[in-house]
Amino acid sequence: MADQKDQTAQLRSEITRLRKELKQALKQAVAREAKLQRYQAGLEAANAMLRELATTDPLTGLANRRMFDARLSAEYLQARRYKRPLSVMLLDADNFKRRNDRYGHDEGDEALKQLASLLNSTVRKSDLVVRYGGEEFVLLLPETDEEHALKLGERILAAVRAQKWHMEPMTVSCGVADLCAAEKEHLQLVTCADKALYAAKRAGKDQVVGYSAVRAE
């Protein structure tokens, strides 16, 4: 009888010990899981930041050329397939080198950020505003033909003229092209918009020109 009681006590002691070890192991497992989740969250945040850096212009916060190229290709295919309008507008700040020479590059950077904000507030949510390089921007305009893109360009010109700039007024020139100008592939839109932009510059700046007018010359 005494032996049986001793065995029972030993078993109970063993069970208590095992329960404590199990509780400690579970506690450690939970801690490890929480640590793994923190690592995973940190990794996902870092990856998200890398993706954003890869597609975002650091000065203006706009999409960059890499993002534009990918989006343009996709929008072009969709527009062609479903016979929907699509336009591209190239926009360049007039006499920007003179601004930098007069007031310094810090002032030039501030002007570019101000212009980027103005463009973002003028377009629709479905449009994409991109810093294309230097003082040049490009707007990708789904569901928009040249006629309506030209009207948007006029609104942008008026908004830029009305804006209160820090050191001196700014104007911009714009060139527009729609799907009618791009019969073979998406990059033709950019090429034709660039030709229209060049025509706007030659004509005296501070204006918007459509590629259809350039092609008719």
Image: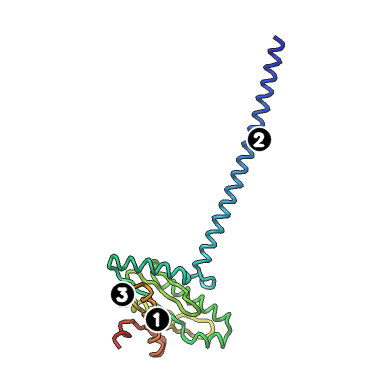
Front-most of 145 and 156?
145
Image quarter where the N terminus lies is top right
Say left or right for 39 vs 78.
right
Specify which label sits upstream in the sequence, 3 or 1: 3
Q: Which residue does the image show at 41% across and 83% down from the upper left? A: 173
Q: Position of residue 175 (x, y in %)?
A: 38, 81
Q: Position of residue 144 (x, y in %)?
A: 32, 72
Real-space CA distance between mark 3 and mark 1, rounded to the nearest whole angstrom: 16 Å
Q: Position of residue 103 (x, y in %)?
A: 57, 85
Quarter-of-image position of residue 191: bottom left
Are there few (<14), some (14-19), or many (20+) residues within 10 Å of tag 2? few
Q: Which residue is mark 2?
A: 24
Q: Position of residue 121 (x, y in %)?
A: 43, 71
Q: Amino acid at mark 3?
A: Glu
Q: Which residue does the image show at 45% across and 77% down from the upper left? A: 137
Are there few (<14), some (14-19), or many (20+) residues within 10 Å of tag 3? few
Q: Are marks 3 and 1 in contact (CB under 8 Å)?
A: no
Q: Which residue is mark 3?
A: 183
Image quarter where the C terminus lies is bottom left
Mark identifier at residue 194: 1
